[in-house]
Amino acid sequence: MPDLGNPIGFDLATVLTGSGLTLLLSAAIAKYGEQFQYNTVELYGMSGAIFIGIGVIFGLVLVATGNR
């Protein structure tokens, strides 16, 4: 039986969750961005760097534990 969560080569649940987080973060920056000392572009850049860092660390943990 094929894996319904992985129909086209990537994990659909992960993609949808990541997209949802990105949209929520974008909405929060658009709504509350002026309350921070950074401008909108800097906030997007910092949040992107944080997401990349979390993803790399999570991936390394998965590899180290033998799950990937």
Image (cartoon, rainbow, N blue to C red):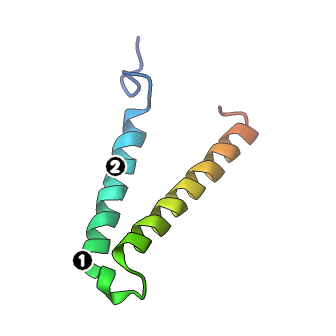
Q: Which mark is residue 20?
A: none
**Kind of residue indicated by mark 2:** Ser
Q: In this view, does 52 lie above or below 47?
A: above
User: Marks 2 and 1: in contact by CB < 8 Å?
Assistant: no
Image location of residue 28, percent across then percent down: 30, 72
Q: Residue 19 carries which label?
A: 2
Left/right of residue 25 with respect to residue 63 in the rendered view:
left
**Kind of residue indicated by mark 1:** Lys
Image location of residue 66, percent across then percent down: 72, 34
Does dot 2 land on a helix, a strand or a loop?
A: helix
Quadrant location of residue 25? bottom left
Q: In which quarter of the image is the C terminus?
A: top right
Quadrant location of residue 54? bottom right
Q: In this view, does 64 lie above or below 24?
A: above
Image location of residue 29, percent across then percent down: 32, 73
Q: Which mark is residue 31?
A: 1
Of marks 1 and 2, which one's residue comes earlier in the chain?
A: 2
Give me the residue at 30% from left, 85% from top.
Answer: 34
Q: Residues within 10 Å of mark 2 (few under 14, many from 20)?
A: few
Give me the residue at 38% from left, 70% from top.
Answer: 41
